[in-house]
Amino acid sequence: MSTLVAVAVLFGIIFLACGGLRQEKRGEALLIAVFFLINLGIFTLFLITDHYIVPFVIIILS
């Protein structure tokens, strides 16, 4: 189950990165990078605590 969550969050991070690549402004790319770091940090936290629902919510919000 945690492998499925890891794959789902990985896809969320990839979509975030692709969204960042499409932006031409430096500030928006920086904002995407910050969201990437927050997403990665929260994902790591919930992977440790073994919650499954929250990473999917993070992907939807991102």
Image: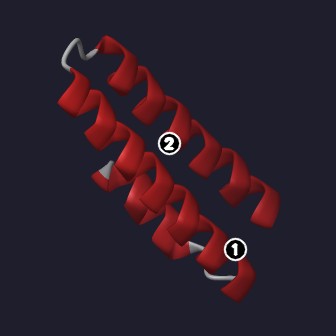
Q: Residues within 10 Å of mark 1 (few under 14, many from 20)?
A: some
Q: Residue 23 sits in which quadrant?
A: top left
Q: Quote the CA–CA distance across marks 1 and 2.
A: 15 Å
Q: Residue 22 sits in which quadrant?
A: top left
Q: Looking at the image, is 24 positioned above or below residue 41?
A: above
Q: Looking at the image, is 25 positioned above or below residue 53?
A: above
Left/right of residue 25 with respect to residue 40 in the rendered view: left
**Residue type of the residue flagged with mark 2:** Gly
Q: Position of residue 39 (x, y in %)?
A: 47, 58
| Residue sitting at x 54%, y 31% | 14
The residue pinned by badge 2 equals: 12
Q: Residue 32 sits in which quadrant?
A: top left
Q: Residue furthest bottom?
A: 49
| Residue sitting at x 30%, y 29% | 29
Left/right of residue 27 with respect to residue 59 in the rendered view: left
Q: In this orientation, does residue 1 appear?
A: no
Left/right of residue 24 with respect to residue 18 in the rendered view: left
At numbered mark 2, what does the secondary structure look like: helix, strand or loop?
A: helix
**Residue type of the residue flagged with mark 1:** Leu
Counting residues from the N terminus, which is met first, the one under dot 1 or under dot 2? 2
Q: Residue furthest front?
A: 26
Q: Quadrant of the N terminus?
A: bottom right
Given contact means CB atoms under 8 Å apart, are the residues at marks 1 and 2 in contact? no
Q: Looking at the image, is 45 positioned above or below residue 11?
A: below
Q: Looking at the image, is 51 positioned above or below residue 12?
A: below
The residue pinned by badge 1 equals: 47
| Residue sitting at x 37%, y 50% | 34
